[in-house]
Amino acid sequence: MSEFILNVIHRPEMVPEYSATVTGHGKEEDIGDKKLLTESLDIFKTQQRLAHENGLKVTIHMTYAALFNKEAVEIAKQDHETYGDEIALSLLGLPCEEFREKYKTKDFCIWMFSMEDKKRIVDDVFGKFRDTFGFYPESTGSYYMDADLTNYIKETYPSVKCAVATCWEEGPKAYHTCNNSWYTLFDGGPWAPWIPSKQNTHAPAADESEDSGIVAIPHLSRDLLACYDGNGSNFGTHPQNVLRGMIYDTKTWEFPYLYNLIDQYRAQEKYNNGYAYNMMFVGPGWMNKMGRWEAPYELLLKSYSDGCKYYGDLKKEGKLTDMTMSEFADYYRKKKTYTEPECALWRDILYGSDKQVFWYTDPYMRAGVSMDQGGAVFDLRPYAAKLKWEVGIGTKHVQDASYPFLIQEKYRAGYFTHYAGEGTIRSAKLSYEGEEVDLCLCRTKAHFSQEGNTRILTLDPVTIEFSDLTLTLQTKEYFEEGSGSIKIERTILNMSSPGASVELNEYMTACYGTTEYPEDMSGILLRCEGAEEKTICYEYRCREESLMKASAVSAVIPAIETKVSMTASDTALGYIKEGYAFSPMFTLGYKKKITEKERFATWLRLEKAD
Amino acid sequence: MAQAGKGRLNYRCPSCFMRDLDIDMFYDKEKKEYYCIRCQYTGSEEDVLAKNEMVRTRYGAMHTRYTKFDFD
C-alpha cells in the first residue's frame, strides 16, 4: 500500500524574518514593536485556522520569543487539545528583546553560534519551554542543525526524536540570490527524511552506532531539478515560494506548479517502497499584511489557503496521511532501515524541457544522474567519509555547513567548459577512427526497477553516429544498497558494421569543494593499482599514468578524508590524470575496445580514507 | 532631492531577477520610477510589471498541469 505523509509546521514568530526590511523600512529598529507582535500573532492564527479548516494536523514550533507571549502559548495549548497539534520547539525565531538582552548579539542562526553558546541557548530555550508547558518537546529544528548541536540536544533532552535539519540545496545559490547577504550555506544533504549520523548531519547513519537518535526532515520539499540550478526558495512546497519565483498567472492568480510539485512528490512512492513525503513550513513573515515582493496580502493569503486545501482534499480522498513531526519519527523508524536508500526519479515540471534526473541517497553517498546527459553522474557527495565538519563561531567553518562534493556540474562545470580544461562529471566517451563522442550529448530517459537490494536505472538506448559507423548503446546503472558504489554498465546493442570495434572510455573527472571556487588540490594521491603500481601526487603538473589490467584506479583526497576509485568488469587500461592550475581536476578512467553485443561495466566506489 | 523609499509593494528588479538575484527596488517619487541599487534598471510600475511578464517566459510549462511524472 502506498502512503503519502505530510508534516505541516507553523511557527509563531514574534519578530518575523524580513520584518526589518519590509514592515520596518524607514523606521528605527524596534524589536519589541507591539504592532509587529500583534500582526505576527494574527498571521499565526490565520495559518492555524486554514490548516484546521482543511482537516490538517499541525506541529506548532514555538519560538523562544513566543514562549514569552501568553496568547501564543494559550493558542498552542488549545490547538493541541482540540486538533491534536504537537507543541514543539523551534530554534528559529530567537530574536526578541529577552534574547538580545541576555546574549548581547544579533546572531539568530543556531548553527553559527559557538558550541558554548549553542549549549547555553539550547538549555535556555528548552528550559523555558518546560517551564511553560510542563514537558520537554519531542520535535525541534532550524534551517540547519549541525551534528554537534543535534548530539548535544539528544544527549541532554532525550525526548527529542524529530528535527527540521536542513534545506535541500540551500547554499551558494541562495546566498547569491539574496545579494550575497543570506548566509545559509548547506548544500549537499538529503531532500527527504533521513536519520542523520552522529558525525555529519547530511550523511545518513549506516547503523545504530552512527545513529544520532533523531529523524531529520528537510525544511520544505523542494523541486529536485529547478532547485539545483536556481534559487531554492522559488521552488518548494511553501506556497509563497512559488509567488517569490513569480510562478503564477497575474490575471487569475493560479499556480498549477505548486500542485505539480506536490503530485510529483506523491509519485516518488514508486521508488521508495510505497512511501512518499511532503513538508510545508511557512513562517509568518511570508504572510505580511503589507504584501511580500510583488504579491499583495490577498494573494499571499490565497496561496496558503489553496495550498492547505489541496493537501486537505488529498486527505479527504484517502491519498494523504497528515502527521505531527513526532508521529512521523515513529512511523519512519518502523518503515525504514538504515541502509534503505531514498530515490527520486524526477522530471522537469516547470520549464517544459522534459529533462529527467535521478537522485539517490544512502549512508554512503548522494548522487545525481542526468538522463539529459546520457546518464552522467552530475553530483556526487561522498557520505562514506562521514566527514566531521564542525560549524559555527570558533570552528574552521563559521557559516559553510555544506557537505563537500566530488562532482558538482554547476559549481565546477560539467561536460561543457569554456576554452580549456575539464569540468566535473562521470560519463563515458566513444572513439572510432579519430572521432570521439561523449555520452553527455545523448539525451535519453530512464526507467526504474528494483531487484533485491539493488535499484536499477535502465536508460533508453541512444544512437552514436560516426562518419563511417553508427551504433546503438544502452546504459544501465545499479545502486546496490549498502555497497557505497555505483555500477555503470554499457552494452553495444548493434553496429552498422558488425565487425567494427570502438574504444569506450569510462571516466570520472572530479575535484572537491563546497562552493564555486577552487580548493587546493595539492597532495591528492592518484593511483593505478595492480601488478605494478603507478602514482601521481597532485602538483598541478598535468601528468598522466596508465596501467593495463589495472585492478583499480583511485584518488585519495585528504582534505575530505575520501577515497574514490573505479574498477572494471574486464581487462582494460586503467588511467589517472592530474590537472593543472587552469583545470584543477583529476580524472580516473578505464579504456577498452568493445564490439557489437559486448558489455562492459565499471564500478565507482566511495570509502573513508584512512 | 529627497531620499527614496519603498513603493506600494516590494517590487524586485526584473533585470536582476532574470539573473537569479532578488533585490528590492527603491522608489524615486520625484521621477515616479523604481530603480535598482545594484544594476542600472529604472522603470515605472507599468514597466516593472511588463518586465515581470518577460521573466516568466523561462517557465515554459508554468500553466501546465502534469498528471504523469515518469516516461514509462
Image (cartoon, grey):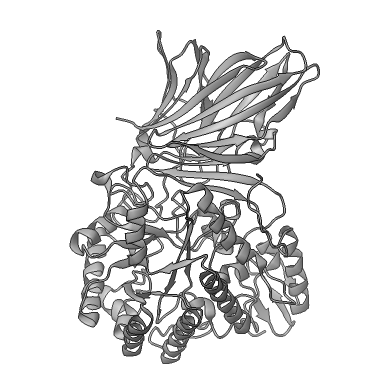
**Which residue is nearer to you in this view: A130 or A557?**
A130
**Which residue is nearer to you in this view: A54 or A554?**
A54
Looking at the image, is A496 positioned above or below residue A150? above
**Which residue is nearer to you in this view: B61 or A292?**
B61
Query: Which residue does the image show at 37% across and 46% down from the upper left?
Result: A203
A248 left or right, relative to A43: right
**Residue located farthest toward the right when viewing the structure as drawn:** A467
Instruction: Report x, y in % for residue A285.
Output: 49, 77
Query: Which residue does the image show at 34% across and 71% down from the upper left?
Result: A90
The quadrant in which residue A242 appears is bottom right
Instruction: Report x, y in % for residue A318.
Output: 51, 67
Instruction: Report x, y in % for residue A46.
Output: 49, 85
Q: How many marks?
A: 0
Q: Quadrant of the C terminus of chain A?
A: top left
Does residue A392 appear anywhere in the picture? no
Query: Which residue does the image show at 40% across and 34% down from the upper left?
Result: A484
Instruction: Report x, y in % for residue A414.
Output: 60, 37
A236 left or right, relative to A432: left
Does residue B16 appear anywhere in the picture? yes
Query: Which residue does the image show at 69% across and 34% down from the upper left?
Result: A441
Looking at the image, is A329 positioned above or below residue A78? above
The quadrant in which residue A129 appears is bottom left
